[in-house]
Amino acid sequence: MAKTASWLMWASLLSCAALSDVGVSSAWARSRPAASAPSLVDSASAIGLSQLPPQAQDVHRRILAGGPFRYAKDGIVFGNRERALPRKPRGFYHEYTVPTPGSRTRGARRIVCGGEVVQIPETCFYTEDHYSSFKPIDPRH
């Protein structure tokens, strides 16, 4: 039994070494979410632009106009590290603060838009809980 356990350990180590040589992460590396993992984007609950809070509608207008923006961090690249949004190359998504009335800080509300041209976004998402969930924005409604 000890020989079998020892052999399995070595086989596992060799497999991981071989996989890492071809660029596949080993069992000890950070695991990737499964392709079918649930997304934090709820496409069934897309929100019409007219349904967003007035502050979010204003930020959306500013995005299309190229500014001006209220906060220095508006327009920075959104890294999508949690992979909550569809995978795109780094630099595709940019984030913007949606002011929260009465808040002394930037608050939790954001619009994240993606596209090759910032002022002509291919897609935009709204989050009111600081990236915990996203709703696609339907600009036609």
Image (tube, rainbow, N blue to C red):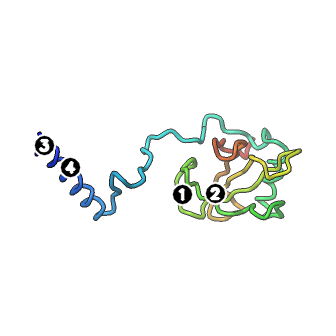
Direction from residue 21 to residue 138 in the image, left or right: right
Work out which quarter of the rendered image holds the N terminus and state it.
Answer: top left
Residue at image mark 2: 114
Q: Which mark is residue 9?
A: 4
Residue contact between numbered discs 1 and 2, judged by CB atoms under 8 Å? yes
Q: Nearer the viewer, residue 89 or 21?
A: 21
SS for dot 1 = loop
Q: Which mark is residue 2?
A: 3
How crowded is the residue under tag 4: few (<14 C-alpha within 10 Å), some, or many (20+)? few
Instruction: Give the amino acid type for the residue marked by disc 2 in the picture.
Output: Gly
Who's the residue at 16% across and 44% down the image? 5
Which tag, 4 or 1, sits closer to the chain's start? 4
Instruction: Give the amino acid type for the residue marked by disc 4 in the picture.
Output: Met
Which tag, 3 or 4, sits closer to the chain's start? 3
Q: Which is more foreground, mark 3 or mark 1?
A: 3
Cα distance between the residues tagged 1 and 2: 9 Å
Q: Residue 54 at what x, y percent from top left? A: 85, 44
Which tag, 2 or 3, sits closer to the chain's start? 3
Q: Residue furthest top?
A: 44
Cα distance between the residues tagged 3 and 1: 48 Å
Instruction: Give the amino acid type for the residue marked by disc 3 in the picture.
Output: Ala
SS for dot 4 = helix
Q: Nearer the viewer, residue 141 or 114?
A: 114
Residue at image mark 1: 88
